[in-house]
Amino acid sequence: MWLENRVRVVNWKNEPAIQFTFVDITARKEAEEALRQREADYRLLVDNQTDLVVKVDLEGRFLFVSPSYCRMFGKTEDELLGNAFMPLVHEDDREATAEAMKELFAPPHTAYIEQRAQTKDGWRWLAWLDTAILDEHGEVTAIIGLGRDITEKRNS
């Protein structure tokens, strides 16, 4: 059992007295531990994922990049977060990418795109399956992208 205690000086019968209050916070502590465990499980999954995982805002700026994404592009998380993804996309593929992104704003709020991107190893073909994150009003608030290098497939 987890208890939180609070101590304060109060006036009791015109004399100062110390009041102790104990509150059972076991449920809160158990919920916090469960959340920590879920976050650790999620982090383990994402950190060991070979596919690329990104989250971008509505302007296409990175909110999250997986370690696999950082490795492929030869950049740190700090170098990517807050920056737009579009400059990494091949100039000839930017219009098609922008058109595919528009699909995210209508049901089923998903889009598939194959595009070339400038990685640390040069231009690579990447296939992306993007899904919109919706708020309680059904408005798109961000986009999750799952990507995979398909260069060998495209070149065969």
Image (cartoon, grey):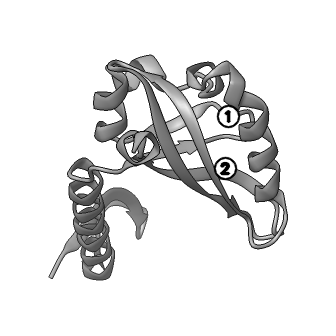
Q: What is the tally of numbered marks visible in this picture?
A: 2
Q: Circle 1: is it few (<14), some (14-19), or many (20+) Cα within 10 Å?
A: some
> What's the residue at 34%, 51% (across, down)?
51
> What's the residue at 42%, 17% (across, down)?
79
Q: Secondary structure at mark 2?
A: strand
Indicate which label's residue lies in the foreground, 2 or 1: 1
The x, y position of residue 150, in whole percent, is 41, 46
Q: Earlier in the sequence, mark 2 or mark 1?
A: 1
> What's the residue at 32%, 75% (across, down)?
31
**Which amino acid type is marked by label 1?**
Gly
Q: Circle 2: is it few (<14), some (14-19), or many (20+) Cα within 10 Å?
A: many
The x, y position of residue 84, in whole percent, is 62, 25
Q: Is residue 72 above or below residue 145?
A: above
Q: Kindly identify which residue carries mark 1.
A: 60
Q: Are marks 2 and 1 in contact (CB under 8 Å)?
A: no
**Which amino acid type is marked by label 2?**
Ala
Q: Kindly identify which residue carries mark 2.
A: 142
> In the image shown, does 50 or 41 lie closer to the viewer?
50
The x, y position of residue 43, in whole percent, is 27, 54
> In the image shown, does 14 or 125 lie closer to the viewer?
125
Which quarter of the rendering shows the N terminus? bottom left
Mark on residue 100? Answer: none
Q: Is residue 141 left or right of residue 152?
A: right
